[in-house]
Structures are given as structure tokens and as C-alpha cells.
Image: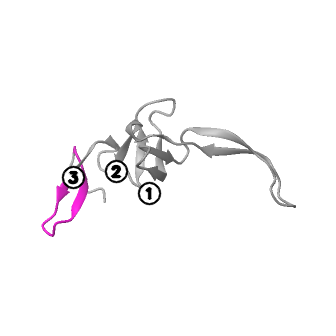
């Protein structure tokens, strides 16, 4: 999967198109990601313990990973990535446009 937890991404499709946010959770098996402030739904929570209050809470829901691109601060937009192998054999992600390392 091309995105990891903690990456800054830009949404490129759907109702939240153009929104930039941080990946809170990556789910490679389902090919989905949870992005902060994107695809927010209302969830009705019941009080579970005494003294706790229930109510309606805003929750971020997962979206397909194909709807997001990694954000490059140098280019200032969501970009595709490519992989380069360094001299020591380490695989790094780089911006396909400008070549800036994203890891």
C-alpha cells in the first residue's frame, strides 16, 4: 500500500475532494485508510459506565486508499509516489514529480 500511518495525504475523489489530512489508521488487507477530518459521520454513543455521558459523536470512517495521494510539501499537492533503492539497500518512497524523499 502506498500510504502509511502518519502520512499527510490529499483526497482526490469523493465529497471531501481537495481536503488535506493525516492518516490515523491504515488497513492494508481491506486497502482502506482513516484520514483525520475526512468522511466524518455521526455515531450515537450510549453511556457505558456510571457518571459517563452518552451522546452523538463525530467519527472518521475509512475510505479506499485509491482515493488519496501522498502530499508533497515541495510540490504543494497530492502526488503519486515511486520507490528508489539507496546504496545501503534501503527502499525509500519519493515524489514522482520532484524526486523529494517522503520517508
Q: State the residue at coordinates (81%, 53%).
A: 47
Q: Which residues are magenta?
A: 84-97
Which of disc 3 and disc 1 is earlier in sequence?
1
Q: CA distance from mark 1 to mark 3?
A: 18 Å
Mark 1 falls on what kind of element?
loop
User: Residue under circle 1?
Assistant: 6
Q: Point out residue 68 in the picture as x, y percentages from the top left corner.
A: 40, 40
- For this rendering, which residue is in front, 48 or 55? 48
Q: Specify whether 101 is left or right of 44.
A: left
Q: Earlier in the sequence, mark 2 or mark 1?
A: 1
Farthest residue, direction bottom: 88
Q: Nearer the viewer, mark 2 or mark 1?
A: 1
- Residue lying at the far left of the rendered structure: 87
Residue at the image position 42 percent from the left and 51 percent from the top = 8
Please report the residue visible at 79 percent of the width from the left and 48 percent of the height from the top: 46
Q: The residue tagged with tag 3: helix, strand or loop? A: strand
- The residues bearing labels 2 and 1 have C-alpha atoms spaced at a distance of 15 Å
Tags 2 and 1 touching, CB below 8 Å:
no
Kindly indicate the quadrant of the structure image that contains residue 103: bottom left
Q: Is residue 85 above or below residue 63?
A: below
Q: Which residue is mark 3?
A: 83
- Mark sitting on residue 73: 2
Amino acid at each position: 500500500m502506498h500510504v502509511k500511518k502518519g502520512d499527510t495525504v490529499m483526497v482526490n475523489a469523493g465529497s471531501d475532494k481537495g481536503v488535506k489530512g493525516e492518516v490515523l489508521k491504515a488497513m492494508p488487507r481491506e486497502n482502506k485508510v482513516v484520514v483525520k477530518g475526512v468522511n466524518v459521520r455521526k455515531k450515537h454513543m450510549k453511556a457505558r459506565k456510571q457518571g459517563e455521558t452518552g451522546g452523538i459523536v463525530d467519527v472518521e470512517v475509512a475510505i479506499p486508499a485509491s482515493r488519496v495521494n501522498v502530499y508533497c510539501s515541495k510540490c504543494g499537492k497530492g502526488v503519486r509516489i515511486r520507490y528508489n533503492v539507496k546504496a545501503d539497500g534501503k527502499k525509500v518512497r519519493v515524489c514522482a514529480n520532484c524526486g523529494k524523499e517522503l520517508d
